Amino acid sequence: MTAVQARIHVSRPGFDLDVALSVAPGETVAIMGPSGAGKSTLLDALAGLVPLSDGRIVLDQDEVSTPRFQLAAARRGTVLLGQDPHLFPHLSARENVAFGPRAAGMPARVARSLAQEWLVRVGLADAGQRRPADLSGGQQQRVAIARALAASPRLVLLDEPLTSLDPVTADGIRALLAEHLVGRTCVLVTHDAVDAVAFADRVAVIEAGRLTQEGTVREVLAAPATAFVASLAGLNRVVGVPASGGVVVDGVLIEGRGDLLPAAEGAAIFRPGDVRIVGAETPGSWPTLVVRVEPTIAGARVHTATGGIAVDVSLDELAVRGLGPGAQVTLAVDPERVRIRPA
């Protein structure tokens, strides 16, 4: 199992990524962040596809990247699997899987036997002779996973490998990866909190090229440090001025539990499902305007003008109250349901 110690600084016009990353042997770290934050660039740097402007990458005791030196991607023992399986179209599934071991010097017969073992593991025992064009998208991704792991990589890099798959197929591939990543060192880029929970021991959040939060998956999702992480966790996170018992957001006091200590700003964190639409005379309530309405599986999520606070409502409540953009509502949330933290 491989350890990773890296400080990755990649700078180009209009883009600057500067992130320190540590991965313990056998650990999976999920990299999350908004589009354009630098997640895929980080993976490309680890794979040896992007040179560093500054910093260094060390796999175990081997320095593989510095601004002056870059070990070739084919020689550093990493595999990168993305949304596109990138299978060789002229080779059968078995020969695709056997490619890595054969390139490493394994005899052809042994490599093909190993490839067949991996096809069995990924549920494609009878697909060895078929070419990629004769396989479904999910089957191609299974072959790509088998090809990646058959090469016995020291570091597995996954760049949103489930994004292009339908939900049923993605669930199958997710279970397959969760099984075969056990004990392997892996860095996973994903937009999906479900993938982070399924695969990762830790999560690192990158925003605008900088690390903004890291910790175990549940720690990060339970206590989001930024609005982006709160959106991943499906929580409201509103920042305001510390006040007795809570924080003041857009002139509204939101009370809750927690200790701000001496903090310049405080954040109130609570679930959209804990916010209620109430009468104007309700103690602790505040008036606001509906900005937009987002359909959900169970009903709708109403986004409001005060701090961007969201409230979950049923379809019946949405229709009865006429909750379209511009509608005025009065909201309240039980202080026992609100956590107050330094921002």
Image: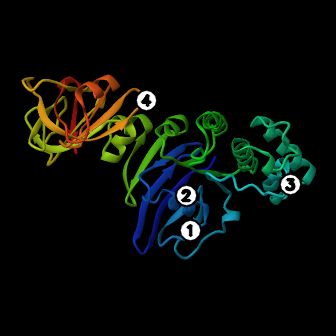
Which one is earlier in the sequence, the residue at label 4 or at label 3? 3
Coloration mode: rainbow
- Please report whichever mark, 3 or 2, sits nearer to the chain's N-terminal start: 2
* Residue 329 screen position, x and y as percent: 17, 32
**Mark 3, residue position:** 106
Which is in the foreground here, disc 4 or disc 1? 4
Which is nearer the eye, 65 or 323?
Answer: 323
Q: Nearer the viewer, mark 1 or mark 3?
A: 1
Disc 2: which residue: 43
The crowd level at tag 4 (other Cα within 10 Å; few <14, some 14-19, many 20+) is few
Going from N to C along the chain, the mark reached first, 4 or 2, is: 2
Can you see residue 325?
yes
Residue on which disc 4 sits: 297
Residue 166 in percent (x, y) is at 60, 39
Residue at the location (79% across, 37% down)? 124
Task: Tell whether label 3 touches label 4 (CB within 8 Å).
Answer: no
Between 101 and 35, the residue placed more toward the observer is 35
Residue 336 lies left or right of residue 20; in this view the side is left
Residue at mark 1 to residue at mark 2: CA–CA distance: 9 Å
Please report the residue visible at 11 percent of the width from the left and 33 percent of the height from the top: 286
Q: For mark 1, give the secondary structure.
A: loop
Q: CA distance from mark 4 to mark 1?
A: 41 Å
What's the distance in space between the residues labelled 4 and 2, CA to CA? Answer: 33 Å
Q: Nearer the viewer, residue 127 or 181?
A: 127
**Residue type highlighted by circle 1:** Val
Image position, residue 177 (x, y; %): 64, 39
Q: Amino acid at mark 3?
A: Met
From the image, tell me which residue sits under label 1.
50
SS at circle 3: loop
As helix, strand or loop, the secondary structure at mark 2 comes to helix
- The number of numbered discs placed on residues in the rendered structure image is 4
Q: Residue at coordinates 44% horizontally, 55% vertically from top-left? A: 35
